[in-house]
Amino acid sequence: MERWLEHIEQEKPLLYVTYNGDFFDWPFLQKRCEVHGINLRARIGVWEQGGEYMGRFSLHLDAFCWVKRDSYLPQGSQGLKAVTKAKLKYEPVELDPELMLPYARDRPQDLAAYSVSDAVATYYLYTTYVHMFVFSLSSIIPLPVSDVLRKGSGTLCEALLMVEAFDKHIVCPNKERAEPLSFHHGHLLESETYIGGHVEALEAGVFRSNLPTKFKLVPRRLQDLIDNLDRTLQFAIVVEGKLSMDDVDPASLAEVKEKITSMLANLRDHPNIEVNPRIYHLDVGAMYPNIILTNRLQPMAIVDESVCASCDFNRPGAKCQKWMKWSWRGRYYPATHTEYQTIVAQLKEETFKPDADSMALRHPPKSFEDLPRELQAKRILARVKKYSSTAYKGFVKEAVEERNACICQRENPFYVDTVRNFRDRRYVYKDLGKQAAKKYRDARTEVDKVKASDEVLLYESLQLAHKCILNSFYGYVMRRGARWHSMEMAGVVTQTGANIIKVSFLNHALMACRAYASC
């Protein structure tokens, strides 16, 4: 330990990089130092605060934070070994934990090789992915580097919105405080949310282009394609091909039309077929940000009739109201409102029994009415849950409702403008990245290749950082305690996205039938 501390004092590092160091490496070192009577903060200026280790003159970055938030790796594949294989594309040295003590006694070189392998993997993971990504985010988000790495995407999004609001002289709203108790048709709600983005699969399974699949086609729809073939071909030539109908040879057009008609007629007459399928990958680019921009969706623009009634623009024929659908989902207790009121009355009459939450208050309460609203709600929920499980043989029921939200199109577009600026800036960085990649391919000297490679990494990191923030603008509005909070907006975005995917799938299916009817 002394040798390691002396090395740190000699090198005076400004940056420590670890993998899960906040919960393993630094706590282990601190406890070892305490056993030997060494003050880690006094020796090298590193200490723990709120579960995170920081330095007085240095910065500690935990690469594990990047993996959890930004690597898009599944929960079970976030260990250093799995991340090394997935991201760095090489097999690290592995060692069974049971063998570490025997190797320390008998084969120290092998144990050292295992330790060095972890250090090398952490170093290259940081330099390849984390370093430039954190730099890019820090150029966007007004927070220290350690916060940019460790905080959630919602916190980063809110910090950015607060700066944008300040620049536009907009007062930031207070943090959202939900009501401790809410009801649905007289029943106490356990929770409420919206139905997130999902699309029901027409058929579930694993499909391959070289395995025959059974198709059950609808003859009437195929006849519709035949009847509308002239209009479809005109759309393909004029809109998609950017040509004029005069540029097309009538004889060739008639030949193509006859060929497609015969193939569609063959499918219409034989609707049940088994053939090798064609696999299509459909990707809707920047879907949620574009939904926000197209419909001018922002939390402060979700209004109701009382807001519109007091608006100067609320006149007959006004087009500033846009109604959009979203799906609400709630879980509620089966106890009726009368039973709920009886339970509350019982709690007020019972002898008050303090618990850990009430005893932690500065002034311990003496009755149920003295409790803060949040603690009252907690006790009521627990009692109603217990009563429902006994009286109704079940804890909660679930309800789904389709609701309408009114989006004001005249609201200050601060939120929408922020999303648009980020989207456009990301496209700029993507174009610069493509130009840098072309420079790298055309580079003739090693110096030019290195310079172009650095540009590729920089612009890729910048566009990825903008992508992470863009994807947070929709989810942030449902974050608990968010300053710009709106369940309706989150529900509208996901419902609209699901509808777009459904329509896009059907349109591409029709195009596939038109172009590849023989399949």
Image (cartoon, rainbow, N blue to C red):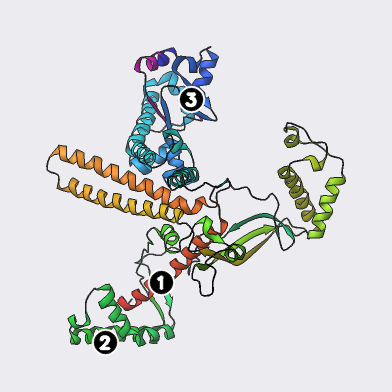
Outermost residue to the front = 312
Q: Nearer the viewer, residue 49 or 289?
A: 289
Numbered disc total: 3
Q: Which comes sooner in the sequence, label 3 or label 1?
A: 3
Relative to 186, residue 177 above or below? above
Regarding mark 3 in the picture, which secondary structure is present there? helix
The N terminus lies in which quarter of the figure? Answer: top left
Regarding mark 1 in the picture, which secondary structure is present there? strand
Q: Which comes sooner in the sequence, label 3 or label 2?
A: 3
Q: Position of residue 335 (x, y in %)?
A: 78, 58
User: In whole angstroms, how far apart are the C-alphas of marks 3 and 1?
Assistant: 56 Å
Q: Quickly name the residue at label 2.
A: 258
> Which amino acid type is marked by label 1?
Thr
Q: Quickly name the residue at label 3.
A: 26
Q: Quickly name the residue at label 1.
A: 213
Q: Which comes sooner in the sequence, label 2 or label 1?
A: 1
Q: Which residues are magenta?
A: 6-26
Q: Are marks 2 and 1 in contact (CB under 8 Å)?
A: no
Relative to 33, residue 403 above or below? below
Q: Position of residue 301 (x, y in %)?
A: 52, 59
What is the number of the mark on residue 44? Answer: none
> Which amino acid type is marked by label 3?
Trp
User: In whole angstroms, how far apart are the C-alphas of marks 3 and 2?
Assistant: 74 Å
Would you say residue 204 is visible in this rendering? Answer: no
Q: Nearer the viewer, mark 2 or mark 1?
A: 2
